[in-house]
Amino acid sequence: MTVKRFAPPMPARSGMHCRRTAFREGTMKLEASAIGFGFGRGVPILDGINLAIESGRILGLTGKSGRGKSTLGKILARHLLPTKGRVLIDGAAPASSGFNPVQLIHQTAIFAVNPRWKIGRIVSEANPPDEMLMLALGVRRQWLDRYPHELSGGELQRVALLRSLTPGTRFLIADEITSMLDPIAQSEIWLALLEISARRDIGILAISHDLALLDRVAVQTVTL
């Protein structure tokens, strides 16, 4: 992977700064528009956050713990509703029913799968497994007859990615997806995602504390 270098961060509104790149014409965009989120009358976790993810590119998101990175990811994937602002896809609100084109991948895949299901049933939940995608992600066919607890963390994370990368997926929220894995598995997974993102024009939000990783995979990095 090539290290991409940028100019020093430019200050931005709402406690965020980013390394800016121009958007390409004819691409889809997933946007957080003036997003706010909090509980009760306490200090909001997020306030006035604006963010845009372009299809076919990887955007990095970093920041100190507790700043709301994972919360923002869940809002973008419609796992949480914002208390303020809107999530938009190409300027319009996403459909409230049907397949969600924004898929969320958690840090620990074991909590995102049914432990009583075999891997074959898990990956077929949204769509039959694609042979080329299985090969790209390093998912072995013999895993399909096993249960989640019979796979390693890295193997199960590959399965979670396979399940999420259905034909209808346009954006992927990758929340610290390789932080628990060894360097070899981390490299293999991100090399595969870089290729898949470019080939299928899928936009990825890479949430991580690992700035060295983001420098290698993201074309732009935003700090909360």
Image: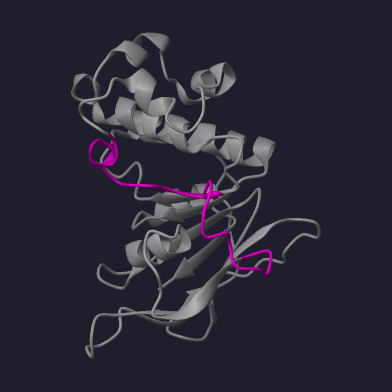
Q: How many marks?
A: 0
- In the image shown, does 222 or 163 lie closer to the viewer? 163
Q: Main secondary structure of the magenta part?
A: loop
Left or right, 116 with respect to 22, comes to: left
Residue sitting at the far front: 97
Residue at figure coordinates x 67%, y 66% from the top left: 21
Left or right, 162 with respect to 144, comes to: right
- In the image shown, does 173 or 65 lie closer to the viewer? 173
Instruction: Give the vertical position of 59 relative to 15 (above or below).
Output: above
* Quadrant of the snapshot with the C terminus: bottom left
Residue at figure coordinates x 34%, y 14% from the top left: 143
Residue sitting at the far top: 142
Residue at figure coordinates x 33%, y 34% from the top left: 183
Q: Quadrant of residue 108?
A: top left
Q: Quadrant of residue 66?
A: bottom left
Residue sitting at the far right: 25
- In the image shown, does 213 or 34 lie closer to the viewer? 34
Residue 187 image offset from top left, x and y in percent: 43, 34
Instruction: Give the vertical position of 20 relative to 169 (above or below).
Output: below
- Reply yes or no: does residue 111 show up in magenta: yes
* Residues drawn in magenta: 89-113
Residue 22 image offset from top left, x and y in percent: 72, 66
